[in-house]
Image (tube, helix red, strand yellow):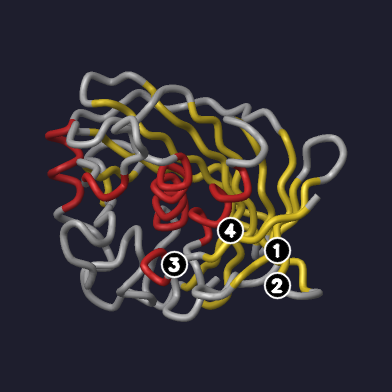
Amino acid sequence: MSQQVIIDSRFHGPPSSANGGYVCGIVAGLIGSTAEVTLLHPPPVGRPLEITRLEGGGVILRDGAMVLAEGVPASVEIDVPVPVSFREAEQAAKSYVWFDGHPFPTCFVCGPDRSEGDGLRIFPGPVAGRNIIAAPWTPHASLADEGGTVRPEIVWAALDCPSGIVFAGPGMVVVLGRLAARLIAPIVIGQRYVVIGWQLGVEGRKLHSGSALFSENGTLHAVGKATWISIVGH
């Protein structure tokens, strides 16, 4: 069984391809609230892509004969750090490493060149005294489903970039290879949240990390576990 999806150019990461976390969320949305998605090629924006459902609950995203992404049901086993307060996240975001020199400054999630109400404008910076990064986030109304909660693929996107920015440094460019996420509770438009990211380990060019999304009162709403691939700088 197959169907088609077109990823709107609004949701790009690099200028000509979709944000990886957003794509993972599109694929995962056909699987369930917990899934793992592997990205094999940059998914283009603005043209039809084919989604195929597999026996056992898996999903494949294709551009013609090219497989772009593969998703499977999965569990997400990860120890989540103690939450960061909204005020701490605001302070951390002031030290966002890519306000200048961002490799993809119009990225839907973390690009500083995106305006309010267009991009997510999630700018994680280091939290004082802790080995994590954090950013505040108040979701815009344009991200809502019919019930007034943030669409699942947007939550996946919000978990994406913080898990990569935790490795950011001068000349460093990384791309998302795999993201597993568990969506625990709805994200409500207009409420205040905190997104965090932290390193889990390095295996050559493979960089492993975690991310999580908390409400302002510290309730865990979503958690992710990512593998990034270093392209430059590692």
Q: Residue at x 61, y 64 (%)?
A: 229
Q: Is residue 229 visible?
A: yes
* Mark nearer the N terminus (1 vs 2): 1
Question: Which residue is nearer to you in this view: 8 or 197?
Answer: 8
Q: Are marks 4 and 2 in contact (CB under 8 Å)?
A: no
Q: Which mark is residue 63?
A: 2
Query: Can the viewer see residue 131?
Result: no
Could you tell me if the residues under marks 3 and 4 are in contact, i.e. CB atoms within 8 Å? Answer: no
> Tags 1 and 3 in contact by the CB under 8 Å rule?
no
69 or 144: nearer the viewer: 144
Q: Residue 149, position in %: x, y?
A: 33, 33
Q: Which mark is residue 119?
A: none
As drawn, 79 above or below 200: above
Residue at (50% x, 54% y) in the render: 21
Mark number for residue 8? 3
> Which circle, 3 or 4, is nearer the viewer?
3
SS state under label 4: strand
Q: Position of residue 40 (x, y in %)?
A: 71, 66
Q: Tell me how far mark 3 sits from mark 2, CA to CA.
A: 15 Å
Disc 3 to disc 4, C-alpha distance: 24 Å
When the figure is inspected, residue 91 is found, relative to residue 19, above or below; the finding is above
Sequence order check, earlier mark of 1 and 4? 1
Residue type for callout 3: Asp
Question: Residues at badges 1 and 4 in contact (C-beta under 8 Å)?
Answer: no
Question: Left or right: 6 with respect to 89?
Answer: right
Q: Nearer the viewer, residue 188 or 127?
A: 188
Quadrant of res 111? bottom left
Instruction: Name the residue: 45% across, 75% down.
Output: 14
Q: Mark 4: which amino acid?
A: Trp
Q: Residues within 10 Å of mark 1 (few under 14, many from 20)?
A: some
Judging by the rendered image, the residue that carries numbered circle 1 is 50
Vertical position of residue 232 compared to residue 117: above or below: below
